[in-house]
Image (spheres, coloured by chain):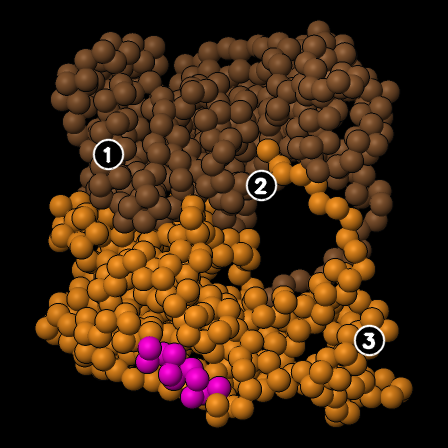
Chain colours: A orange, B brown
Amino acid sequence: MSGPPTAGTRPDEVRRHNRTALLRRLHVGGPCTRAELAAELGLNRSTIKALVDGLADAGVVVEQVSAKRTGAGRPSLLVLPQPRSLWVLAVDVGVEQTTVAAVGFGGEVLGTRGWTLPRGTGSPDDLLAKIGTACRRLAERIGSEPVGVGVSVPGVVRRDGFVHEAPNLHWEGVPVGERLAAALHRPVLVGNDAELGALAEHTRGVATEAADMVFVSVDVGVGGGVISERAALRGSGGYVGELGHMVVRPGGRPCYCGCQGCWETEIGEDALCRALGLPEGSPREAVVGELRALAGEPQAALSRLREFTDWLGLGLINVVNLLGPQLVVLGDLLAALPDAVVDEAAETVRERSLVSRAVGGIRIVASPLGKEAKIIGAAELAFQQALAG
Amino acid sequence: MSGPPTAGTRPDEVRRHNRTALLRRLHVGGPCTRAELAAELGLNRSTIKALVDGLADAGVVVEQVSAKRTGAGRPSLLVLPQPRSLWVLAVDVGVEQTTVAAVGFGGEVLGTRGWTLPRGTGSPDDLLAKIGTACRRLAERIGSEPVGVGVSVPGVVRRDGFVHEAPNLHWEGVPVGERLAAALHRPVLVGNDAELGALAEHTRGVATEAADMVFVSVDVGVGGGVISERAALRGSGGYVGELGHMVVRPGGRPCYCGCQGCWETEIGEDALCRALGLPEGSPREAVVGELRALAGEPQAALSRLREFTDWLGLGLINVVNLLGPQLVVLGDLLAALPDAVVDEAAETVRERSLVSRAVGGIRIVASPLGKEAKIIGAAELAFQQALAG
């Protein structure tokens, strides 16, 4: 049953709505002329002028005479976002490495800090304190306060920033959002790393045109993020789906989750190490190095990664049959796979997935953002809220 | 990137929005007083009066003095939906049986027609002609025209009513929506049977309170419908997910879809027949009869359906881990399973699904609507559009 109807829209709500749309256009699409803004947003030029003037007064944009000329009249003014006027902190809590970045309005990275910790060492307390310090240092260097904070965590994250479980960090029940918000005196939004990878690819990557897409990534574990009709898909309690814990090989290797033969045990980082003949838990550079070495040798790549490719393809058939995306983006460690492996898994899906056949073929591609996707997604999560405010 | 902003809302749009909300409230929730309508919809009493007066003039509702008294003042008038004032045709194309029903505003069934055909016999042309005739007969008996037509098909259905594939009907590429619309001169909406089962359970069944739910049903094949944040989940091109074609047993029985060991080959009707010691393709009554006989014998049920129960539980773990619903409803033939089997599969999910543990336990229940779910869903699909118009 649909809820109660909304009341009529008030003029100040329309103004705010239009301002948010304009800010998002500039943030995602970059500088453009007032005429382009009017055309793209479907607003008249006087409305655009009033909005841009307001933002220019606040120092959020500046206007310049454009070099482009489109007619005989005066050249349209070019509107440029000012990165330092509105900026956010983005945090990527990785299994081995944590990165904190200051990201400006328009997407420019204003500064970063990062550090490496051996896997499974470091308590949440220590890490959150370290993140807090790094965030404050970045703010001091920029000389102003961020408008928001976005955090990526490789775990089961609730919409309110509570991390139920982050097995590869050995975290359980950590209220990350609440703790960082108290330390930074700023609104903090927390997302699952693959969910934020999906947001990054949908906002600034290869999936900007895909209304329905799935992002599958490997960073030790296997995660997934789903965009459905241009919005993030979330289940009850705000938890996103855990694609890595789909059982694909009943009776297979035991997984920490309580099942056997999860997709994670078959295509996670350990499985990739085994396929490549590396010890499980090898440093990331070693794994990526082996994969890069196979890039120019498709036959060798397919033969060494035969079983891995089969499990990748099988899991993707399931993902596509259940969720029906038009595009699947393979992220993080999967973005380093040799093309021959990605192409073969994609071919398997096109041949054997009923849903792929129905929609006329689903595209499966490696992420162009690679391991940056998570921190870009964390920044975009913060900007989504900040630009709407 | 978000699209262009909407313009301000016009007064006539607000009125239409409010009328739709009021019609949906009466259709789904049944008769209630003007005061209840005002409270539930968050509208003032004069707005409700104007809307109800308009609907009463059109014959869509009548008002009666309510027996209920809530205060010292005049009793509030009770508003009753008039079933024959606004009615729809609902069609359930089943593998063995086709049913056509006339369903009135408020949900009352005004008449039905149905027939049985041996599996796989009958061309789409013949069946669509027969459905057209049955629809016209029902309209003649009621003496007015339906405001819409909803059709349930057990297959891969696109949003525009094109059936890409309905393997158990042996249909391929049938424009069901277009053909019936031409025959009936009425708007026709077509949905996948499990998608409509989900809609029925969410509107009138056990899932009215569940914002995120999954409906899994067996009618020969295995289908699934997903409601996410109170809306139907659809993939690209408007195709819904095909839960039955998730591979759960690699190397298992070949499925017509091109994979082996699909969930459908392990828990579809044939698998149930094998588990019960019946020949594959046994009549539906025989299968249901065997299941009913096991209802009072939990130990016998679990032992005869041991393997079936394991595959049911395993597939449900995957569905829950990928989609994170709060409730899973088992429909159609699965609704006839002995309680012991459903309870054991539910227990497996609660123990072994990471996502179930995160949200504090997911409920898995048999559908109370049973095999009626599909035709109720088809009617509700037609009403969704008709009441919004």
Which residue, given by chain and number where applicable, does mark 1 sit on?
B347
The amino acid at mark 1 is Glu
Q: Residue furthest top?
A: B141
Location of the C terminus of chain A by quadrant is: bottom right
The amino acid at mark 3 is Ala
Closer to the camera: disc 1 or disc 2? 1
Q: Residue at x 77, y 65 (%)?
A: A15
Which of the numbered marks, if any, corresponds to residue A50? 3
Local crowd at mark 2 within 10 Å, few (<14), some, or many (≥20)? some
Local crowd at mark 1 within 10 Å, few (<14), some, or many (≥20)? some
Of residues A347 and B355, the one nearer the viewer is: B355
Q: Residue at x 26, y 82 (%)?
A: A116
Label 1, label 2: how far apart the Cα atoms are: 36 Å
Q: Is residue A144 left or right of residue A285?
A: right
The amino acid at mark 2 is Arg
The chain to which mark 1 is attached is: B
Q: Secondary structure at mark 1?
A: helix
Label 3, label 1: how far apart the Cα atoms are: 60 Å
Q: Residue furthest right?
A: A73
The chain to which mark 2 is attached is: B
Pinpoint residue A162: horizontal percent, then vertical percent.
38, 59
Q: Secondary structure at mark 3?
A: helix
- Write down the region rendered in magenta: A129-139
Q: Is residue A104 above or below residue A251?
A: below
- Predominant SS of the magenta segment: helix
Which residue, given by chain and number where applicable, does mark 2 sit on?
B159
Of residues A131 and A292, the one nearer the viewer is: A131
Pinpoint residue A175: horizontal percent, then vertical percent.
36, 62
Residue B125 found in image quarter: top right
The chain to which mark 3 is attached is: A
Pinpoint residue A121: horizontal percent, then vertical percent.
19, 74
Badges 3 and 1, same chain = no
